[in-house]
């Protein structure tokens, strides 16, 4: 059996080990300590946020953002439909009701026109959402200008799910710093990782102080344990923050490597596109800078002599190469099918035609050769001969 080529595998170096070693030597194994402080400080610098709290996950960051925005049982929250379920699950944790918004076909993210329709209707019905959650899918920034201006018109705060988009930007403004809150993830498959972890970002430093308070069991200041709020155990450990510090030092290299992967795929597919296939990518509008966390392709069978993304996925699997369909939209998920949604067909088509290709920052030339050789076999069958 050939060795497995993963979709996106962790990429860890020596610096991470050094910072973690320090935690052992200094006995800072607690969920707070110097690595947590430094990691937060460094994240604040690169995202230009006023406050950052590092947490156990991106999911917990979204949950705290909803709590801090006062989202309660029965409230409505708008969420991008095509995304990982972690964008939507915290809405349910609060007993609130998600309403899903479809995407536009440029960035594959929340469609500002549909958002406007949904907000207009919500206002007419006298029940505006308490928050809006757009996502920067696969690292490509959503159309934040338009989304923010519509949200502002209706006075609804935005939680920006930048879990996949650390290192991405619009006109040099980093993703994560557009909304009332920004959310990052350092899960094992993300562009940088702490094995598991996340961060909550805000322009409002006081809100981040509150997030830290809630994330450490909401302890009142008293010599004994006293609580006037429901708290959570959501703080990142000092050991994991050590990994994060080391990873952050190489973020630029990681972004460059992922962007190079994208260029390499693009060049490869142009060869087959010239031979009659029509393989499409997530294209960046002008001023949009994607970290290209994952390179994804769209394979419309009607334009490709019947070739589907599933034929490609299964053929790669035969060669022990991992690829994956795009996120299945939330409005199609068994757990959310009964929720209200505003649809235009874009995310359904993305799910039908879309495939994420191996995109790790540590992919080798040999691995790329294997991927391209496997793809050649399929494409040569379907392209015009
Ligand atoms: C990974 C991810 C999250 C959740 O992050 P975790 O750290 O895994 O909890 C949220 N939203 C999106 C879009 C993600 O890709």
Image: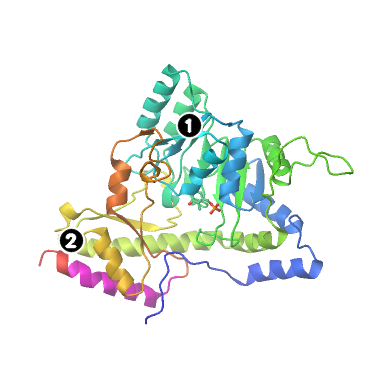
Give SS at disc 1: helix
Of the two numbered discs 2 and 1 on the same chain, state the one appearing first in sequence: 1
Mostly what secondary structure, the magenta segment? helix
Q: CA distance from mark 2 to mark 1?
A: 39 Å
At horizontal 57% and vertical 69% (from top left) the residue drawn is: 12
Q: What secondary structure is found at the residue carrying circle 2?
A: helix
Name which residue lies at 54% across and 42% down: 90
Q: Is residue 195 left or right of residue 7?
A: right
Name the residue: 45% across, 65% down: 360
Q: Is residue 371 above or below residue 282?
A: below
Residue underneath mark 1: 148
Decide whether residue 280 is among the magenta residues.
Answer: no
Residue 18 image point, x, y percent: 69, 70
The residue at the far right in this view is 223
Q: Are marks 2 and 1 in contact (CB under 8 Å)?
A: no
Q: Quadrant of residue 181?
A: top right
Question: Residue tagged by mark 2?
Answer: 274
Q: Is residue 102 above or below residue 322?
A: above
> What segment is highlighted magenta in the picture?
363-380
Question: Closest to the observer: 162 or 197?
Answer: 197
Instruction: Tell me if 240 is positioned left or right of 156 in this view.
Output: right
Return the residue nearer the eye: 140 or 218: 218
When asked about the image quadrant of residue 141, the answer is: top left
**Crowd around label 2: few <14 · some 14–19 · many ≥20 (10 Å):** few
- Whether residue 174 is visible to the viewer of this picture, yes or no, is no
371 inside magenta stretch? yes
Query: In the rendering, which numbered label is found on residue 25?
Result: none
Q: Where 26 sits versus 292, above or below?
A: below
């Amino acid at each position: 059996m050939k060795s497995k080529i993963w979709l996106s595998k962790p990429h860890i170096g020596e610096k991470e080990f050094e910072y973690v070693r320090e935690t052992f030597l200094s006995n800072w194994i607690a969920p707070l300590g110097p690595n947590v402080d430094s990691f937060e400080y460094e994240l604040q610098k690169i995202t230009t946020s006023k406050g950052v709290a590092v947490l156990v996950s991106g999911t917990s960051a979204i949950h705290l953002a909803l709590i801090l925005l006062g989202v309660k049982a029965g409230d409505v929250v708008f969420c991008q439909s095509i995304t990982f379920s972690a964008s939507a699950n915290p809405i349910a944790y609060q007993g609130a009701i998600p309403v899903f918004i479809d995407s536009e076909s440029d960035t594959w993210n929340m469609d500002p026109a549909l958002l406007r329709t949904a907000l207009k209707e919500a206002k007419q019905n006298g029940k505006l959402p308490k928050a809006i959650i757009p996502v920067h899918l696969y690292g490509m920034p959503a159309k934040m200008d338009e989304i923010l201006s519509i949200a502002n018109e209706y006075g609804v705060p935005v939680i920006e799910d930048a879990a996949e988009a650390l290192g991405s930007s619009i006109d040099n403004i980093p993703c994560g710093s557009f909304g009332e809150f920004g959310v990052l993830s350092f899960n094992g498959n993300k562009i940088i990782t702490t094995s598991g972890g996340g961060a909550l970002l805000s322009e409002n430093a006081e809100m981040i102080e509150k997030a830290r308070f809630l994330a450490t069991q909401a302890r009142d200041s008293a010599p004994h344990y006293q609580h006037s709020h429901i708290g959570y155990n959501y703080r990142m450990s000092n050991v994991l923050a050590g990994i994060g510090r080391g990873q952050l030092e190489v973020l630029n290299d990681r972004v460059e490597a992922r962007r190079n992967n994208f260029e390499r795929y693009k060049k490869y597919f142009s060869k087959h596109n010239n031979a009659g296939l029509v393989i499409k990518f997530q294209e960046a509008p002008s001023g949009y800078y994607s970290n290209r966390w994952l390179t994804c392709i769209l394979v419309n069978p009607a334009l490709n002599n019947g070739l589907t993304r599933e034929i490609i996925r299964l053929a790669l699997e035969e060669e022990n190469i991992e690829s994956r369909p795009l996120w299945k939209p939330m409005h199609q998920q068994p757990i959310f099918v009964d929720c209200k949604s505003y649809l235009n067909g874009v995310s359904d088509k993305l799910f039908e035609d879309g495939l994420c290709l191996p995109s790790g920052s540590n992919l080798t030339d040999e691995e790329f050769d294997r991927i391209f050789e496997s793809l050649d076999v399929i494409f040569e069958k379907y392209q015009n001969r």
